[in-house]
Image (cartoon, rainbow, N blue to C red):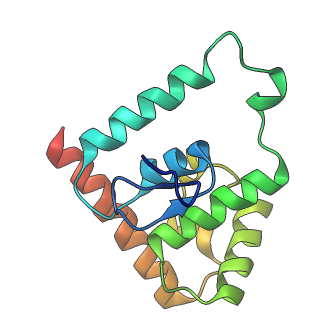
Amino acid sequence: TSNNEQLGSWTCDVCMQAEFEDYENAVAHERICVGTNNTQARLSHSNKAEEKATSPQQDEQDQFLTQEKAREEVLQWLSSHLPRLQKEDAEKYCTGLMEDGFDSLDVLAGVSEEDLTFMKKAHKRTLLNRMREGSNKNVEQD
């Protein structure tokens, strides 16, 4: 994750396009970003986030996502897999996912076709294909 000090934002090292106001959201995006085959960068940032998350100084409140943060994670996940999605569809899909408990990146990693009954057919197909492509890239590089 690159820090752009002039804008006060973080840029994804995987796709080099997505920008975030804080480090945690940038790292969360990089874990699921399919912008490139850069698995090493994803692992490096994932490890840094885990070290930070397990540090003794962490407040108890930081262990849980607020509804607002969860919504941000789900919307970022959707935009990383369906980047040209219309805003109305993104909101509908975010709500559907969160109502079914898919409210964090960890849980979204296990989403399946049966979980996406509220999505339009083409969006569902594209999302599932991109998820498969992302997992295939990780397997090939391991």
Q: Is residue 37 above or below residue 89?
A: above
Q: Position of residue 17 (x, y in %)?
A: 40, 68
Whether residue 84 is visible here, answered yes or no, is yes
Q: Position of residue 44 (x, y in %)?
A: 35, 33
Q: Nearer the viewer, residue 82 or 113?
A: 82
Q: Is residue 115 above or below residue 121?
A: above
Q: Is residue 89 above or below residue 25?
A: below
Left or right: 67, with 104 as reference point = right
Tell me the quarter of the image containing the C terminus: top left
Residue name at image x 16 percent, y 44 percent: 141
Q: Nearer the viewer, residue 117 or 48?
A: 48
Q: Position of residue 73 (x, y in %)?
A: 64, 56
Q: Nearer the viewer, residue 12 or 5?
A: 5
Question: Residue furthest toward the left?
Answer: 140
Residue name at image x 58 percent, y 64 percent: 76
Q: Position of residue 35 (x, y in %)?
A: 32, 64
Residue 132 image-quadrant placement: bottom left
Q: Is residue 64 above or below residue 53?
A: below
Left or right: 32, with 42 as reference point = right
Whether residue 100 is visible here, answered yes or no, is no
Question: Residue furthest toward the front?
Answer: 6
Residue name at image x 24 percent, y 55 percent: 136
Q: How many marks?
A: 0
Residue name at image x 70 percent, y 53 percent: 103
